[in-house]
Each structure stands twice: as C-alpha cells, then as structure tokens.
C-alpha cells in the first residue's frame, strides 16, 4: 500500500515539474522595481511609452494616491467580488485574480497600453502581483502593484466606496 502511495506521489511530482501548468512547491515572490517619479510621469502624461526592461512596478501608498488624484490610471481590485462589494477604491473595477480569463469581455475592453494600479487586501497579499503577472503575459505593459492595498488605503482614511 505504501509503495502505491509513494509511486503515485513520485509520478505526480514528476508530471508537475514538466507540465507548463505545474504548481510551484515553494511559493515565489517576484522582486518588483519601485516606481520612480519618471515612471509616474510616463503614466500621468499618457505618452504610451512602452518599457523594455519592466512592465510591473511596485508603488507606495503616496504614489497610489497621487495616481488616484490625477485619474491617470484605472485601479483594479484583485480581491473576490464580495470583498470588493464591501468596499473598494472609488472608480476601481473588480477583476478577481482567481477568475482571471484573458478572453473575458472586461479584459478585452481594457487598453493594453494604459496604466493600471492593481491592489488586493494588503500586507502579504500576493493576489495583486499574480494578477499583474497574468496581465503582463497577455501584453499589458504599464502595471503598478500597490502592495499596501486596501488595508493601507483604508488606514490612511483615503476615499472609499461600497456597493452595499
């Protein structure tokens, strides 16, 4: 019996390691470059400049708020729809990471050259980074990950809205 269990586990691990859809055994956290003022200026001026060396940048609370005030990028909430309904950054859209589908009407309607600020719950939430990576794979090239996310936004008493 143990031989069958160990054999099945070995076959599963081998298949997982060679499969393009395999699951990582140890989670990864992509090191993101911090956005600088020129990076934000690119977005604010809406120049359409493509970056050759990176397309996902990490932004701070202050930078996220600056982008929000300037209305220079669309905010995307990567959390579940019920968390989004409970509260979100005004004018943001909900694109739950776990349901991301490149062929969905909402994704197809987004301009791949526009700027997007992606956020989730905050702290150690990696949902926004995973969504940014999926968007990058299909050609989006101006993605900002607001790592502090919803929690940091609310704690700063910045504007919020709710669908309830």
Image (spheres, rainbow, N blue to C red):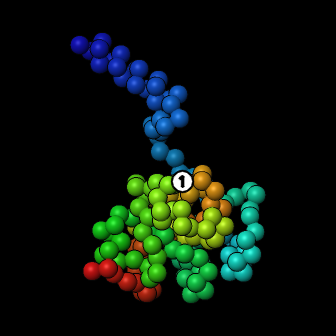
- Residue placed under numbered mark 1 in the picture: 134
- Of the pair 103 and 25, the residue shown nearer to us: 103
Q: Is residue 56 left or right of residue 102?
A: right
Q: Position of residue 43 (x, y in %)?
A: 68, 75
Crowdedness of circle 1 by 10 Å Cα count: few (<14), some, many (20+)?
some
Q: Quadrant of residue 136?
A: bottom right
Percent x, y of residue 89:
44, 79
Q: Residue at x 46, y 25 (%)?
A: 15
Q: Residue at 52% of width from left, 47% of height from top?
A: 28
The answer to which image quadrant residue 63 occupies is: bottom right
How far across and down, in percent of the image, does residue 124 sit? Answer: 44, 60
Residue 74, image x and y in percent?
A: 54, 75
Position of residue 90 relative to residue 7, above or below, is below
Q: Residue at x 36, y 71 (%)?
A: 84
Relative to 102, is 79 above or below?
Answer: below
The answer to which of 108 and 97 lies nearer the viewer is: 108
Left or right: 138 in relation to 90: right
Q: Residue at x 45, y 38 (%)?
A: 23
Q: Residue furthest left?
A: 1
Image height of 80 relative to 152, above or below? above
**Up-down relation of residue 62 to residue 102 (above or below):** below
């Amino acid at each position: 019996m143990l031989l069958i269990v160990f054999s099945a586990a070995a076959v599963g691990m081998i298949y997982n390691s060679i499969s393009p859809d395999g699951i990582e055994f140890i989670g990864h956290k992509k090191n993101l470059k911090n956005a600088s003022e020129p990076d934000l200026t690119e977005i604010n001026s809406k120049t359409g400049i493509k970056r050759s060396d990176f397309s996902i940048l990490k932004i701070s609370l202050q930078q996220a708020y600056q982008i929000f005030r300037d209305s220079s990028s669309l905010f995307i909430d990567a959390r579940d729809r019920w968390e989004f309904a409970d509260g979100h950054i005004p004018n943001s859209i909900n694109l739950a990471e776990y349901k991301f589908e490149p062929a969905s009407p909402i994704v197809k309607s987004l301009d791949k050259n526009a700027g997007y600020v992606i956020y989730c719950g905050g702290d150690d939430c990696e949902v926004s980074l995973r969504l940014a990576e999926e968007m990058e794979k299909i050609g989006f090239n101006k993605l900002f990950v607001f790592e502090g996310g919803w929690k940091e936004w609310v704690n700063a008493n910045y504007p919020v809205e709710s669908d309830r």
